[in-house]
Amino acid sequence: MHVRDDAATAAATPDVDDTPKAVSRRLRLITLIATFGGLLFGYDTGVINGALPYMTDDLGLTPFTEGLVTSSLLLGAALGAVVGGRMSDARGRRRTILVLAVVFFVGALGCTFAPSTAVMVGARFVLGLAVGGASVTVPVYLAEISPAERRGALVTRNELMIVSGQLLAFTSNALIARAGGESGGVWRWMLVLATVPAVVLWSGMLVMPESPRWLASGTRFAEALAVLKQVRSRQRAEAELSEVSALAVREEQEKLGGRQDMRSTPWVRRLMLVGFGIAIVQQITGVNTIMYYGTQILTDAGFTSDGALTANIANGVISVAATFAGIWLLGRADRRPMLMTGQAGTTVALLLIGVFSVTLPAGDTRAYAVLAMTVTFLAFQQGAISPVTWLMLSEIFPMRMRGFGMGVAAVVLWLTNFLIGLVFPSLVDGIGVSNTFFLFVVAGLLSLAFVKRYVPETRGRSLEALEAELRSRYS
C-alpha cells in the first residue's frame, strides 16, 4: 500500500496547525452528535442477527420470510437514500438529520410491537428509510464541515459508530437472550433499545450548525462564514469561504444540481457511474451476510445457538478495532490502494470459509476455523473497504448535487445489499454455504479489476480542488 507524507497537503492548506482548542472541541462535538445517525444505522442493521432466531418461532417465519424481514429494511434504505439525498440538498443537512431521527424512533417502535410478519416487514421498511437517509446525509454533513486534512478521519468516525452500533446490537442480543432465556418475545427487548440513540440524535442536532457548504450553495455566504468560524480559525474560515463561494457561483450559473445533469452533463454522468461501481464493490463482498446471518453461519459451522450468539460478539469487536485502524490508515495511506487491499483480504477470507466448510468435519475445529475467517474478513472489510467507500462517496460529487449524487449511489448500494440479503438464505438452502461463498469470491475478483481501472484517488485535496480535478478528468 502506498503511503505518502502529508506535508504537501498541509502546505496547500492554510492554517492547518493554528486551530484554537475551543474550535477543535466544537468540531469533535458536532462529529459525535451527527454520528449517532451511524450508531442507529449499525444497531438497526445488526440487531436482526440475534433477534431473527427468536422472531422465527414467534412469527412463524420460513426461509423466504426470514429473508424478507431482513431485506425489507434494505429496500427501505434504497428509497431512503435517494429521498434523503434530495431532501438534504433542498432543505439542508441538519434539518434532514432531525427528520431522520424521528423516523428512526417510529420505525424502532413499530418493529418492537409488530404482531405479525406483515407488520414487521412494514416497520422494517420504515426503519430502512431512516437508515438509508442517514447513510447519505451524515457522511456528506461531516465531509462538508471538516477541514481537508481531517476529512478522512472525521467522516470515517461515522463508520466507527456504525460498527459500534453493530457491536452494541450483538452484545445486547447475547445479554438479553441469556437473561430472557426461551421466554416469548425476548426479541422485542432487543429491538426497542434503538429508540434511545434516536432521542439523543434528535436532541443533539437541535443545537448543531448547518453545513457551511450547503449554506454557500444557496448563496447564504454570511451564514456559511459564521459556521466556518465555529470550526476553523478566522483567517482560514475567510479563505475557505472564498473558494467555496466561487464554486457555488459557477455551479449556480451552470444550473448544476439534479437528475437532469446526471443525464446531460458527460463528466457528471461518468462520475455517477464510478460512484455506482464503488457502491457495488462495497456490498458484493457479501459483508452483510455475516452482519445479518452471522449467528446462523456459526451455528451451521458447529456452534450451539447460545455459543454462536456469544461467538458473534467477536465479529463486532474486530469490526470496531479494524475501523480504528482504518481511521489511522486514512490519514497516512491513499484511498484507492486501501480499497484494493481490503478487497484482496476479504476475497481470500471468503475462499477459506468455503474451503473449510467443505473439507473440515463438523465439530469444534470447523466452528473455530470459520469464526477465525469471519473475523479476518471483517478486519479487511471494516478496516479498509467500508470506511473508504463512504468517504469517497461523500467526496466525489459536485457541491450543488452532493446529496443527490451520493443518494443515487447509495440506492445502488442498498439495492445490492437488498438482493444479497434476500437471496442468501435460499442460496445456502439450495447450494450450501461453501458454494455460496465461492460465488462471492468470483465477485471479489471482478471488483478488484474495477477499482484498479476506474476509481480515482481523492486524498489530500479540498472538496473544491477535487471537484475541479474530477471535472477535468471526466470531461
Image: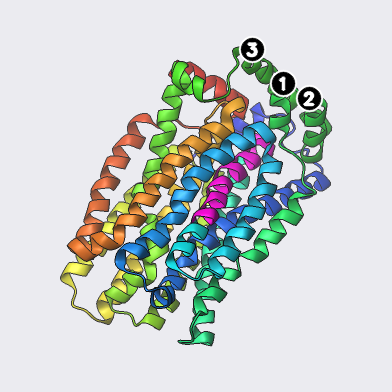
Figure quadrant of residue 155: top right
Q: Which residues are magenta?
A: 125-149
- Is the Cβ of the residue at disc 1 closer than 8 Å to that at disc 2? yes
Whether residue 161 is visible, yes or no, is no
Q: Is residue 132 magenta?
A: yes
The label nearer to you, 1 versus 3, is 3
Q: Is residue 458 left or right of residue 433?
A: right
| Percent position of residue 142, x then y | 64, 42
- Is 255 situated left or right of 123 in this image? right
Mark 1 or mark 3, earlier in chain: 1
Question: Relative to residue 100, is residue 313 depicted above or below?
Answer: below
Q: Which of the two labelled residues, at mark 2 and mark 3, occupies the earlier sequence position?
A: 2
Please state if 199 lies on the left or on the right of 78 as rendered: right
Which quarter of the figure has residue 460? top right
Q: Amino acid at mark 3?
A: Gln
Mark 1 residue type: Ser
| Crowd around label 3: few <14 · some 14–19 · many ≥20 (10 Å) | few
Mark 2, other Cα within 10 Å: few <14 / some 14–19 / many ≥20: many
Q: Residue at label 3?
A: 253
Q: Which residue is mark 2?
A: 221
Residues tagged 2 and 3 counted as in contact (Cβ below 8 A):
no
Mark before the other along the chain sequence, 1 or 2:
2
